[in-house]
């Protein structure tokens, strides 16, 4: 529910990327996204309009998914940019590929 502070804010586009893991509570997240009128944008990415700040969204998601959840949720807005609401960045699966490709080319 929007606070009185967010009720006076102008709606802005929010993009939400989520990874709840194998045992994550996807049903609760999907209900929350449906309530917000979110649209699907690809695997584990949604977008919706909101008057809430990223911090207000973080509180809602913490309450929804739990404090001890291993969920990772990243939000992007035009005004605030991008940041993790829950969880943190992991090592990228592509890390090291470029160096390996350069080394392979030099070996040939």
Image (cartoon, helix red, strand yellow):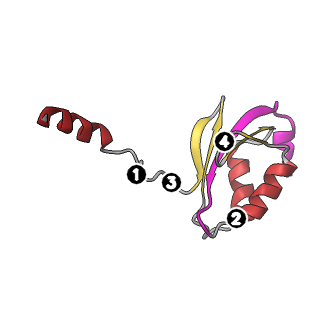
Instruction: Count the numbered circles shown.
Output: 4
Q: Quadrant of residue 16?
A: top right
Q: Residue at x 80, y 43 (%)?
A: 38
**Counting residues from the N terminus, which is met first, the one under dot 2 or under dot 4?**
4
Mark nearer the viewer, 4 or 3:
4
Q: Nearer the viewer, mark 3 or mark 1?
A: 1
Whether residue 99 appears in magenta in the rendering, the answer is: no
Q: Secondary structure at mark 3?
A: loop
| Residue 98 in picture, x, y percent from top left | 30, 37
Q: Residue at x 82, y 30 (%)?
A: 10
Distance between the Cα atoms at labels 2 and 4? 21 Å
Q: Give the Cα distance between marks 4 and 3.
A: 21 Å
Residue linked to disc 3: 88
What's the distance in space between the residues labelled 4 and 1, CA to CA?
21 Å
Mark 1 vs mark 2, foreground winner is: 1
Q: Earlier in the sequence, mark 1 or mark 2?
A: 2
Residue at which label 1 appears: 91
Asked if the stretch drawn in magenta spans residue 18, the answer is yes
Tell me which segment is drawn in magenta. 1-22
- Tag 4 residue: 42
Q: Badge 4: few (under 14), some or many (20 or more) residues near its Cα, within 10 Å?
A: few
Where does the image place residue 52, in percent across and percent down from the top left?
Answer: 77, 42
Residue 2 in the figure: left or right of residue 42: right
């Amino acid at each position: 529910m929007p606070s009185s502070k967010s009720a006076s804010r102008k709606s802005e586009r929010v993009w939400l990327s989520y990874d709840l893991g194998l045992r994550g509570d996807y049903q609760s997240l999907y209900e929350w996204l449906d309530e917000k009128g979110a649209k699907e944008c690809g695997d584990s990415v949604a977008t919706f309009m909101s008057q809430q700040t990223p911090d207000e969204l973080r509180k809602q998601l913490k309450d929804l998914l739990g404090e001890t959840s291993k969920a990772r949720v990243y939000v992007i807005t035009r005004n605030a940019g991008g940041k993790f609401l829950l969880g943190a960045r992991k090592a990228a699966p592509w890390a090291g590929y470029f160096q390996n490709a350069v080394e392979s080319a030099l070996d040939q």
